[in-house]
Amino acid sequence: MLPLQGRTIAVTRAEQQLGEARRLFEQAGARVLDLPALVIGPPDEWGPLDDALAELEEFHWLVVSSSNGVDAVEERLQRQGRCLARRPASLKIAAVGRKTANRLEALGAPADFVPPDFVADSLIEHFPVSGWGLRLLLPRVQSGGRTLLAEAFGEAGARVVEVAAYESRCPAALPEAAAAALVAGGVDAITFSSGKTARHTALLLERQFGSAWRERLEGVAVVSIGPQTSRACREVLGRLDAEANPYDLNGLVVACSALLTGSESAADSPA
């Protein structure tokens, strides 16, 4: 029997990025309830990113922490008649996360460095060269992203240019199917892939159900993709039941499976 057979899992991701998560959870036997919590779009202005990309040959490293950042950089480069696959020979690329690295591969621009753990802290800890004297370009989400990378590289002596490459906004409302399933008590677990998905989901639930919105999550396991997301879950939802390990979608499926089946190989469930 598949580990999630007969279970309903609500997956909170960007509207455009539910497909891969759905596939993995369905392979494990789950019924997937789409709960979009992010709408990915352009930043308020493209100028800072375009200006930085026009000087790409002056950077030593491009550091990307999401596939959204990769896509934004590629789109804006193409408007300048260039692309990541034909970037300056002197420019190396560091990628946080398997999905980010896979997106670079698909564009013909494989990352020169991917940290062993798929979080920003691991990239800093294992970065292959000293940051002293390096010039780094960090495209990132406009709001709500961590400044850890920029701060850490700056402290190491690097000159960091951090620019907004995209924005992740909150959808207008919960899908009707998701709201109905929560009312009926038909959801076994809800998964979060970023701190923003947790915060936006809390906002969407409050809009839908009012001040008693937390009651709709009673009996629903809360599962996070990694440490920063876990912190946000505890902050806005008041609890966390399991955390993925490794910090990716496969780890998220394993964490849900272990938690809901009571397996001790659980997923490193935090207290």
Image (cartoon, rainbow, N blue to C red):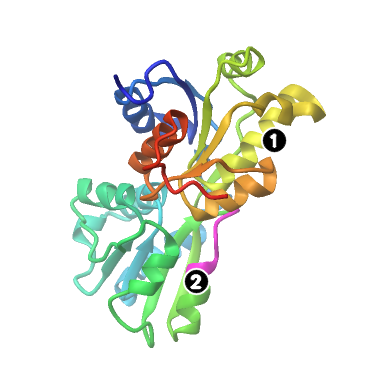
- For image coordinates 30% across by 22% down, the residue present is 2
Q: Is residue 49 magenta?
A: no
- For image coordinates 34% across by 66% down, the residue present is 62
**Front one among 261 and 47:** 261
Query: Percent position (x, y) of residue 131?
Result: 37, 82
- For image coordinates 29% across by 24% down, the residue present is 27
Identify residue type, mark 1: Leu
- For image coordinates 66% across by 15% down, the residue present is 183
Give the label, 1 or 2, closer to the camera: 1
Which residue carries the number 1 mark? 203
**Front one among 44 and 113:** 113
In this rendering, is residue 271 above or below 139?
above
Quarter of the rendering containing residue 137: bottom left
Query: Percent position (x, y) of residue 43?
Result: 54, 49
Which residue carries the number 2 mark? 150
Tag shown at residue 15 = none
Crowding around mark 1 (Cα neighbors within 10 Å: few <14, some 14 to 19, many 20+) is: many
Name the secondary structure under disc 2.
helix
Label 1 vs 2, first from the N-terminus: 2
